[in-house]
Image (cartoon, rainbow, N blue to C red):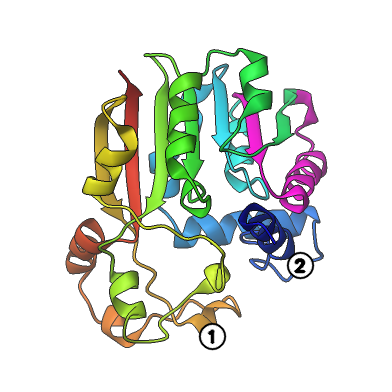
Amino acid sequence: MKIKNKIKKFWDNQPCNIKHSNKKKFSKEYFNEVKKKRFFVEHHIPNFAEFKKYKNKNILEIGCGIGTDAVEFIKNKAKYYGTELSKHSLKIAQKRINVLNLERFKPIFLLEDAEKMEKIFKLKIKFDLIYSFGVIHHTPNMAKVFNNIHKIANKKTEIKLMLYAKNSYKNFMLKNTIYRYEAQKDCPVVYKTDMIELNKLIKEKFKIIEAKQDFIFPYKIDKYKKNIYEKIDHFKYMPKKIFKKLEENIGEHFLIKLKKI
């Protein structure tokens, strides 16, 4: 099986965050709980995405998944365009818009390979923001995605991307323990990036506005899966200031802001 087909099959079988609620699947209550859990655990996302900033602006999200971030952009009246490789994830995102009565904002969802972006190129839209959170590191050729972003963006376009960080607490632990895989267990492609790799990807086509690390998952997995947020012992007793410093230095999310040169 070709690698891209393996990737599609993997994410069709287990769309990201699909197990974040035990409510009736794809109900309003289900989607609300998925959102609550995502932003409680990954509380840095709203600050990074700045959902309220893009009212009446053209937003492209590369890899919308089941639409958690998409909904926040759409609720805040962005002109939203979302792409997704997984057909199943895309259908859930579209259903979510219907369940939450957001059709009036006319978001556009496209089944699209980030390494190709053919449908997006045909739209010829000037995007104010190109956003992707935790997606590009799951495609075989990240350089192709960066090249496409360069072609789609103009010099005023804000570009916000989250890639997995190479020098992270999670990676250190996975070398020696069964710390955690979550949905990425057996994922066909998972790249990790640092500043050296980022500079190779941007190849002087982008200016780095900001690049920083954030987020360490501090909870016990068995409890977390039951919606019980009990911290691992060494995090339980760690002062918040120390934990924050760890996130800044060895956080697993590499938060990147770029502008096209």
Quick one: label 1, few (<14), some, or many (20+) residues within 10 Å?
few
Between residues 161 and 24, which one lies in front from this camera angle?
161
In the rendered view, would you say 216 is above or below 213? below
Residue 226 belongs to magenta span: no
- Percent position of residue 87, x then y: 76, 48
Q: Residue furthest front?
A: 1
Mark 2 closeness class: few <14, some 14–19, many ≥20 residues within 10 Å: some
| Three-letter residue code for mark 2 | Lys
Image vertical order of residue 198 relative to residue 127, above or below: below
Query: Which residue is labeled 1 in the image?
Result: 222
> Foreground residue, 6 or 21?
6
Residue drawn at 72 percent across, 33 percent down? 109
Q: Amino acid at mark 1?
A: Asp
Q: Tell me, yes or no, whether the two marked residues, 1 and 2, touch with CB atoms within 8 Å.
A: no
The residue indicated by pointer 2 is: 23
Q: Which residues are magenta?
A: 78-104
Q: Is residue 129 above or below residue 99?
A: above
In the rendered structure, the answer to whether residue 213 lies left or right of residue 174 reads left
